[in-house]
Image (cartoon, helix red, strand yellow):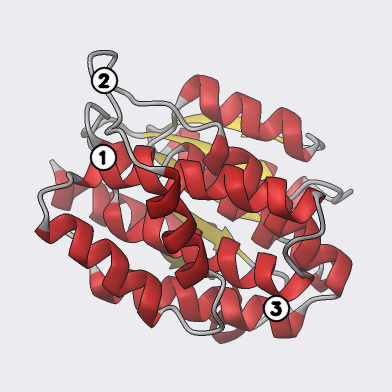
Amino acid sequence: MFDAEVFSRTASLFATKRKAFAEDAVELLAGDIMRRLASARPHDPGFEAPEISDDSIAAFCETFIRPTPDAALRFIEDRRAEGVTRQGVYLGYIVAAARSLGQGWDEDRYSFLDVTYGTGHLYALMRALRAETYGARPAVDGRRCALFATVPGEDHGIGITVAADLFREAGWEIDLRTDTDHDELIAHVEHTQPHIIGLSLSTEQRLDALVRLVVAMRITVPSAIIGVAPATNVSAERLRDLVDIDLVFEDAPSACRDLERLVRLRD
């Protein structure tokens, strides 16, 4: 059930982020990932995380802070071969490793590069394992419902408001959020668990905020379909190179057609 292609693509995306953004933006993103992964809880209240020795966690940490993800991938594949479940890997190894990484960073045992390599590989493992889908709802259940939101910090919500009205006229139920800060928006996503999310990016200067938002959403609602309507000066190719998204929307009518097609495929 481990998706090696997703792992490779997500790890590559994160490596691109390290090169594209300022150090403080990457540090903020790394801190978000550690905090959210470290606080993960099982969806199934009856699930018990496997008992894992401190030595095994330490060995895992040594693999995922390396520049390339190959050693971390081999380590998890070995644990899976030993019979550890996907959810066991996620809630046993990844959560414990995120906590260990955060503590090591606070105590200056890990460098900035160690932390950015480590968080990128942990996030990629989380995406590939999809362990949090146990007990979760399917990505699309046939209802025409979606969350539409502007990227935090943006002042312009006219375009996404017009898009929301068009979708409503087409029979969709749209939860529209504009001028909402990052933490408030993620708390809303955690509470409502949307199946489909459409985001509006009106300026390239908020691209780092978009990346941070999508990563937090992937951890919070891993099965959601996420699409972005970009600013005119941000190409679809650049978005796909930097942001972990499913769709790039050219305009509201084509976005409506794309999402209708996805819903029909999942019906």
Amino acid type, residue under disc 2 in the picture: Asp
From mark 2 to mark 1, how far is it between C-alphas? 10 Å
Q: Is residue 171 left or right of residue 31?
A: left
Question: Circle 3 sits on which residue?
Answer: 18
At label 3, the amino acid type is Arg
Residue 230 shows in this picture: yes
Q: Above or below — where is 159 with respect to 18?
A: above
User: Which residue is at 56% across, 83% downward?
Assistant: 67
Q: How crowded is mark 1: few (under 14 residues within 10 Å), some or many (20 or more)?
A: many
In the rendered image, residue 155, in percent from the top left (x then y), is placed at 89, 48
Badge 2 marks a residue whose secondary structure is loop
Circle 2 residue: 44
What secondary structure is found at the residue carrying circle 3?
Answer: helix
Task: Describe residue 159's horizontal placement relative to residue 36 as left or right.
Answer: right
Image quadrant in which you'd find residue 217: top right
Quick one: label 3, few (<14), some, or many (20+) residues within 10 Å?
some
